[in-house]
Image (cartoon, grey):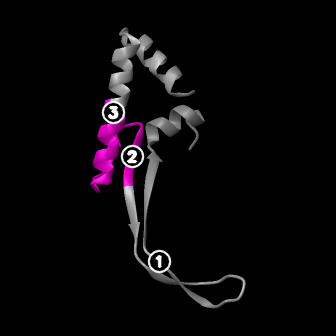
Amino acid sequence: MNRRDLVTAIAERTESDKKTADAFLAAFTEVVTETVAAGDPVAITGFAKFYRRETTARMGRNPATGEPIKIPAKKAAKITPLKGFKDAVLGGKK
């Protein structure tokens, strides 16, 4: 499903026009992106949690040679599916 299909599906479910659904989707994306970029997580109960994860610099080991190497600090965007979403997609498997 691409953006166009998603906008159409939202418009049908909410009984609104595609322009309104597209504006909603764009606003949702902007708000989630801005909030996570600021360092705050966004959790939508039963769906997903969006957050930014920061790791510190650390020492690691080259698996091929066993030689110690420095691993730099980094930031990563993460999305974790929550229980309600996983249950719906996986058919209630535990």
Residue 28 image position (x, y, % from top left): 33, 33
Say what amino acid the circle numbered 3 marks. Answer: Phe
Q: Which residue is mark 1?
A: 72
Q: Quadrant of residue 76?
A: bottom left
Which residue lies under the disc numbered 2? 49
Please report the residue visible at 32 percent of the width from the left and 38 percent of the height from the top.
30
Gap between marks 2 and 1 measured at Cα: 26 Å
* Segment tinted magenta in the rendering: 27-51
Closer to us: 37 or 41: 37
Where residue 84 sits: x, y (%)?
45, 36
Camera-side residue of 91 and 74:
74
Give the CA separation, mark 3 to mark 1: 33 Å
Callouts 3 and 1 close, C-beta under 8 Å: no
Q: Amino acid at mark 2?
A: Lys
> Which residue is at 33% across, 23% downward?
23
Q: Which mark is first along the chain, 3 or 2?
A: 3
Closer mark to the observer between disc 2 and disc 3:
3
Q: Are marks 2 and 1 in contact (CB under 8 Å)?
A: no
Residue at 64% over, 83% down? 62
Front-lying residue, 60 or 87 = 60
**Crowding near the residue tagged with mark 1, few <14, some 14–19, many ≥20 C-alpha atoms within 10 Å:** few
Q: Position of residue 21 (x, y in %)?
A: 37, 19
Query: Is residue 34 toward the left or the right of residue 64 in the image?
Result: left
